[in-house]
Image (cartoon, rainbow, N blue to C red):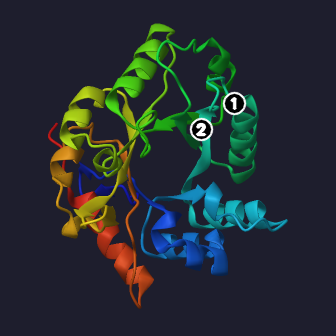
């Protein structure tokens, strides 16, 4: 029986975005070491983050080997946007993202829209959508230009009109940074979502902060229930404590426990 099943009921895959362990630990120990923690805690996969890479010659190879050893699915998160500040498709960024994803054995590349502008032609993006081994997923980030409903709705509608399938990475926390309601956004994009970044939020006097789901001021369970049951869920909130395996295991099981109506 796979990790994703319990009895006869389907259990959604749960990944750990390795930023959850913090930049300091990632830079000190490397993301391969963090992937081992996630695997030991029962996660189904990990999201390796471009901004946390240390630049070692064997880094990507080691990460691929750890993921394969533990049977982890892999997502590669590029910190670059699909479109440049000037509004042109950033082919160099796409090349870098897909090259690294292939080297990692990742099944998905996650990027934001970057400098996308409504009405932009998507035909130049099509060659990357025809990759057999790696799927592009597009995330709502924390910016008005790439993390609010209007540009994302325009992008996914234009992609659909071309017959292109581009799943959305729905970051349930980021909507708070852009001043939008995650439940409303979930209603708009439910049919497009293929991957969910699960992030609790709390408001401090100065800003929003990411917190574990159980501490969240937002209705995260209701958001999850807007999506199909098989959509992968990734932990992207701080995982902290003396026993990181146990902390991670607790939150992996919590995410698996939220059932979606058939």
Contact, mark 1 vs mark 2 (Cβ under 8 Å): yes
In the structure shown, which secondary structural element does the residue marked by tag 2 occupy? strand
In the structure shown, which secondary structural element does the residue marked by tag 1 occupy? loop
Task: Give me the residue at 43% from left, 65% from top.
Answer: 43
Q: Which residue is identified by label 1?
A: 90
Task: Give me the residue at 30% from left, 74% from top.
Answer: 250
Query: Seen in the image, is 63 located left or right of residue 159?
Result: right
Which sits in the foreground, 206 or 256?
206
Could you tell which of marks 1 and 2 lies nearer the N-terminus?
Answer: 2
Q: Furthest-front residue in view?
A: 206
Q: Which mark is residue 81?
A: 2
Locate residue 231, reporting x and y percent.
35, 42
Q: Residues within 10 Å of mark 1 (few under 14, many from 20)?
A: some
Q: Quadrant of residue 212?
A: bottom left
Task: Give me the residue at 27% from left, 61% from top.
Answer: 200
Query: Seen in the image, is 167 located left or right of residue 200?
Result: right
Which sits in the foreground, 177 or 229?
177
Assign the C terminus to one quadrant of the image: top left
Q: Residues within 10 Å of mark 2 (few under 14, many from 20)?
A: many
């Amino acid at each position: 029986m796979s990790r994703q099943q319990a009895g006869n009921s389907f259990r959604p895959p749960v990944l750990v975005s390795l930023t959850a362990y913090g930049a300091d630990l990632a830079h000190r120990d490397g993301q391969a070491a963090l992937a081992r923690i996630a695997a030991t805690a029962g996660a189904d996969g990990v999201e390796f983050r471009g901004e946390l890479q240390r630049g070692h010659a064997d880094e990507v190879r080691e990460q691929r080997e750890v993921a394969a050893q533990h049977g982890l699915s892999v997502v590669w998160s590029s910190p670059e946007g699909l479109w440049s500040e000037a509004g042109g498709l950033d082919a160099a960024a796409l090349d870098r993202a897909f090259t690294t994803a292939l080297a990692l054995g990742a099944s998905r590349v996650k990027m934001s829209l970057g400098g996308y502008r409504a009405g932009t032609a998507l035909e130049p993006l099509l060659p990357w959508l025809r990759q057999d081994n790696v799927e592009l997923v597009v995330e709502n980030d924390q910016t008005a230009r790439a993390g609010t409903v209007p540009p994302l709705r325009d992008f996914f509608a234009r992609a659909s009109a071309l017959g292109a399938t581009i799943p959305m990475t729905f970051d349930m926390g980021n909507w708070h940074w852009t001043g939008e309601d995650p439940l409303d956004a979930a209603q708009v994009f439910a049919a497009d979502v293929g991957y969910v970044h699960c992030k609790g939020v709390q408001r401090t006097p100065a800003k929003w902060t990411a917190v574990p789901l159980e501490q969240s001021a937002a209705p995260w369970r209701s958001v999850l229930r807007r999506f199909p049951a098989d959509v992968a869920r990734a932990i992207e909130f701080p995982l902290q404590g003396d026993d990181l395996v146990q902390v991670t295991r607790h939150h992996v099981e919590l995410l698996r426990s939220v059932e979606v109506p058939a």
